[in-house]
Amino acid sequence: MGRKGFIVGLALGVLLGGGICCVVLVSTPAEQPRHSSDLKPFLESYFDAWSRGDIEAYKSLFHKNARITYVEGGTARPPLSRDAFVRQQ
C-alpha cells in the first residue's frame, strides 16, 4: 500500500469513527495522490494542523471515541484512545 492508501485509510478511519481502521505503511515510491473532492478539504486540514503543531486542531479531526493501534515490525501495540494517542505525538 502506498501513500495514497495510507491517507485514504486514515481519512476513512477518522471520518467513520467507531469502526475498525487498519493503517499499514509500506515503503514504496511516491505515488501521485488522487483524492475525491470530499476528502481533499479534510486531508488538507489534517496535514495543515499537524504541520502547524496545532495539537487541539489535530485532535479535533479524530472521532472522540477513536481507538488507534500502532503496528511496527508486524507487532501491534495496545490500542490507544484518541487523547492518549494525541498526547504521545
Image: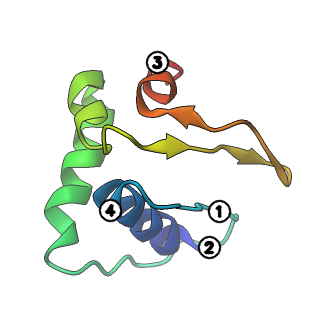
Q: Residue at x 73, y 48 (%)?
A: 71
Residue at which label 2 appears = 29
Distance, label 2 to label 3, CA atoms, is 31 Å
Q: In the rendered structure, which disc, 4 or 2, sits on the residue that comes first in sequence?
A: 4
Distance, label 3 to label 1, CA atoms, is 21 Å
Q: In the rendered structure, which disc, 3 or 1, sits on the residue that comes first in sequence?
A: 1
Asked if the residue at tag 1 contacts the one at tag 4, i.e. Cβ–Cβ closer than 8 Å, the answer is: no
Callout 4: SS: helix
Callout 2: SS: loop
Distance, label 4 to label 3, CA atoms, is 22 Å
Callout 1: SS: loop
Q: Amino acid at mark 2?
A: Pro
For residue 52, which quarter of the picture? Answer: top left
Q: Which mark is residue 24?
A: 1
- Residue 33 appears at what percent x and percent y? 37, 76
Q: Amino acid at mark 1?
A: Val
Image quarter hosting the N terminus: bottom right
Q: Residue at x 70, y 64 (%)?
A: 27
Q: Residue at x 50, y 29 (%)?
A: 85
Q: In the rendered structure, which disc, 4 or 1, sits on the residue that comes first in sequence?
A: 4
Question: Could you classify mark 3 by the number of other residues whose Cα lies within 10 Å: few (under 14), some (14-19), or many (20 or more)?
Answer: few
Residue at which label 3 appears = 87
Q: Amino acid at mark 3?
A: Arg
Distance, label 4 to label 1, CA atoms, is 18 Å
